[in-house]
Amino acid sequence: MFGNYLIGLREGLEAGLVVCILVAYLVKTDNRAALRPVWIGVGIACAISLAFGALLEFGTQELTFEAQELIGGTLSIVAVGLVTWMVFWMKRTARHLKGELQGRLDAALALGTGALVATAFLAVGREGLETALFVWASVRASGEGSSAPLVGVLLGIATAIVLAWLFYRGALRINLSKFFTWTGGMLVVVAAGVLAYGVHDLQEARFLGGLENRAFDISGAVPPDSWYGVLLKGVFNFQPDPTVLQLVVWSLYLAVVLTLFLLPFRSGKPSGPPDGASAQTPGGTARG
């Protein structure tokens, strides 16, 4: 549940901050008439993301077991790739996100209503589709067979909405750089588990070999149905009897990606006050 809460919180807050920047800029530049197209674009993005999630959940139920595992494993790996790209993209561009979005919004204002809808849709839709895919893959990996993963996601999104609203009102100030660094690092750990599970799916689909080659089996010490087994599974997608290939992929991904993510980012741009160091809002400033 915690892993899915983290996904909902991280992705929801990114989308929420994007909406805050768009809305605040329109209000400050006295373009309130453009708010309606922006909210229409946000609504369309949310609806398509929900439809995509429903398609992933129900669209594969009539397939054979091997086909389900092949699709599930492939999409899990795609989801990990998208999330990995996202955490590095946010690390690289968060400081200048505000200026980039405002530039796009200025261009859309000059083009008209349709461009405003498209700008908001594209800004939020990417986050929504990534969230739907990664949540689906993470829920499959957790294998809890309960509503806890979905509850975790919804609680994370609800928390993100509250935080985004507080940012907009200027009532909350936190170090966004540290926040995204910590949550990004934790997401990399979650993604490593999803990647290992995706590899296991491909092995069960007979697309990859080595299904019978277990790296170890500590099911006796960590029973999957124990409270700590469920906790490890829900948070880290821990498996007490992984295959050798799963363990190798998990170890390599975690070692390489986490190391690169934690390295200090060096920009070739001249030093100066970054665009995204603070999110200007009508009610105040949310400092990064």
Image (cartoon, rainbow, N blue to C red):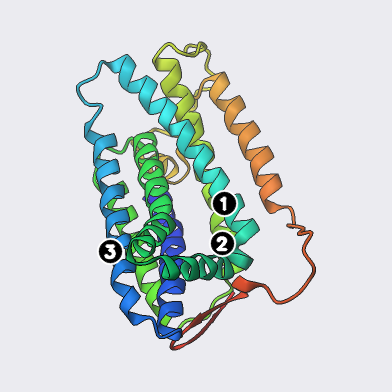
The answer to whether residue 167 is visible is: no
Considering the numbered disc 2 on the image, is that residue within a helix, a strand or a loop?
helix
Q: Earlier in the sequence, mark 2 or mark 1?
A: 1
Picture quadrant where residue 142 is located? top left
> Would you name the residue on which mark 2 appears?
180
In-front residue for pair 162/21:
21
- Residue 105 lies, in percent from the top left, at 47, 68
Considering the numbered disc 3 on the image, is that residue within a helix, a strand or a loop?
helix
Looking at the rendered image, the disc whose residue lies closer to the viewer, 3 or 1, is 3
Label 1: few (<14), some (14–19) or many (≥20) C-alpha neighbours in 10 Å:
many
**Vertical side of 145 occupied by 4: above or below:** below
Q: How far apart are marks 3 and 1 (CA)?
A: 27 Å
Considering the numbered disc 1 on the image, is that residue within a helix, a strand or a loop?
helix
**Vertical side of 81 occupied by 215: above or below:** above
Q: Distance between the residues labelled 3 and 2?
A: 28 Å
Residue depicted at x 54% and y 76%? 174
Label 2: few (<14), some (14–19) or many (≥20) C-alpha neighbours in 10 Å:
many
In-front residue for pair 129/122:
122
Q: Earlier in the sequence, mark 3 or mark 1?
A: 3
Q: Are marks 2 and 1 in contact (CB under 8 Å)?
A: yes
Q: How far apart are marks 2 and 1 (CA)?
A: 8 Å
Q: What residue type is labelled 3?
A: Ile
**Vertical side of 59 occupied by 95: above or below:** below
- Residue 40 lies, in percent from the top left, at 28, 64
State the mark number for residue 87.
Answer: 1
